[in-house]
Amino acid sequence: MRMAFEKPVALIRAQGTLPIFDVDSMLRVWEYSPNLWRSTLESDIPALTVHIKGAWENRNSNKSYLQILKE
């Protein structure tokens, strides 16, 4: 729905899972360690924060999913 309304989207998936439908190769997808160990969380959480902030900061970009498809 967010893509349809050209809203910011932060795509996230566990490492080793299948690509996210048809957008995986066009949009930035952040992968986290599925182990969820304390040591991996300590590095994953700050990186996830950067990923989400990046999606928000680029919300006015002309590179939304729908605009990419139109090219």
Image: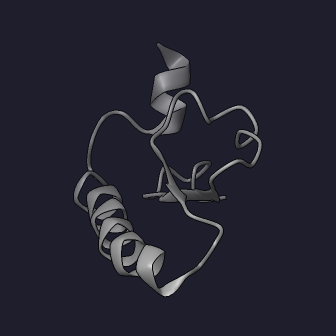
Q: Nearer the viewer, residue 4 or 51?
A: 51
Q: Is residue 25 left or right of residue 44?
A: right
Quadrant of the rendered structure where residue 53 is? bottom left
Residue visible at 55% across and 81% down in the picture:
37
Residue at position x 43%, y 39% from top? 64
In-front residue for pair 44/55: 44
Left or right: 58 as drawn, with respect to 16: left
Q: Horizontal and vertical percent for residue 12? A: 56, 59
Q: Is 36 left, or right, of 7 in this rendering?
A: right
With respect to residue 6, does 46 lie above or below?
Answer: below
Q: Give the total of numbered labels.
A: 0
Residue 39 percent coordinates (x, y):
42, 79
**Which residue occupies 30% across, 74% down?**
46
| Residue that appears at 39% across and 68% down | 48
Left or right: 34 as drawn, with respect to 68: right
List x then y, in percent, for residue 14: 65, 59
Q: Position of residue 51 (x, y in %)?
A: 35, 60
**Which quarter shows the N terminus?**
bottom right
- The relative height of residue 46 versus residue 8 in the rendered view (above or below) is below
Render colour scheme: one colour
Q: Nearer the viewer, residue 57 or 45?
A: 45
Indicate whether 36 appears above or below 69. Answer: below
